[in-house]
Amino acid sequence: MMIKQWVRASMAALAVAMALYCGAAAAHGRVAMEEDTCMRRLGDNSMVHLSAYQPQHEPGDQYCTEIPKEGDTFLVVDLVDQALRDIPIALRVVRGTSEVDDETVTYLHPASHPDGVIRGETTLDQGVYTVFITGDSVPPVRYEYPLRVKMVNYGNLLRASIKPLIIVLLLTFIAYKVASSKRTREWWATRRGR
């Protein structure tokens, strides 16, 4: 009887831990440049950073490649490398993965961006998209960002749930060992005898 209660409590704790942990991992937030999955590097110096916003859903959250909901999405590309600010840079969003063969949903013509920021807006439905950032220079500049809109990434979900699952299983095992120990049985026997 007590073991069943421990198992139920452990499963409830696992569900709460997974919900909190996965929710915290949804937005990309503030991390070091070297660890930021939204940073793209070309060669040694040329870097860009993509942020996506959906203020109509979550005003304070920023995303990168995993967009949680459909709808209006603001894209902000930071041209980290100073040299990129002086050349014409274009931004294209396609539904799919091919810049040539798939449908273009948003296109910003090549332009210089002295402030180092490219701003664009697009409407995204559920599915896979790709953001292409290209620049006319020698050598040519080209960055790609795959976007997944309103799609569950089961690999990330599994990786995020492993640590809480191990903790809950370990706590369940310890609780089982304590509950099944001779001292605990003797303690319960004396409590029932009163």
Image: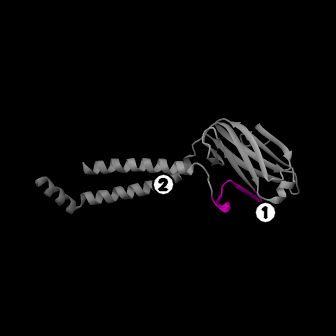
- Measured as percent of width and height from the top left, residue 149 is found at 64, 40
Q: Residues within 10 Å of mark 2 (few under 14, many from 20)?
A: few
Q: Secondary structure at mark 2?
A: helix
Residue at x 86% of width, y 47% of height:
111
Residue at x 61% of width, y 53% of height:
29
View extreme (left): residue: 194
Highlighted magenta segment, given as a residue range: 31-47
- Measured as percent of width and height from the top left, residue 45 is found at 78, 63
Q: Say which residue label 2 marks.
A: 162
Label 1, label 2: how far apart the Cα atoms are: 36 Å
Q: Secondary structure at mark 1?
A: loop
Q: Say which residue label 1 marks.
A: 45
> Residue 24, relative to residue 69: is it above or below?
below
Camera-nearest residue between 61 and 110 = 61
Q: Is residue 130 visible?
A: yes
* Amino acid carrying mark 1 in the image: Asn
Left/right of residue 127 with respect to residue 77 in the rendered view? left
> Residue 54, relative to residue 33: is it above or below?
above
> Residue 5, relative to residue 36: is it above or below?
above
- Measured as percent of width and height from the top left, residue 105 is found at 75, 36
The reply to whether the magenta stretch includes residue 38 is yes
Left/right of residue 165 with respect to residue 95 in the rendered view? left
* Amino acid carrying mark 2 in the image: Ile
Ranked by sequence position, the earlier of labels 1 and 2 is 1
Left/right of residue 109 with respect to residue 1 in the rendered view? right
- Measured as percent of width and height from the top left, residue 80 is found at 76, 58
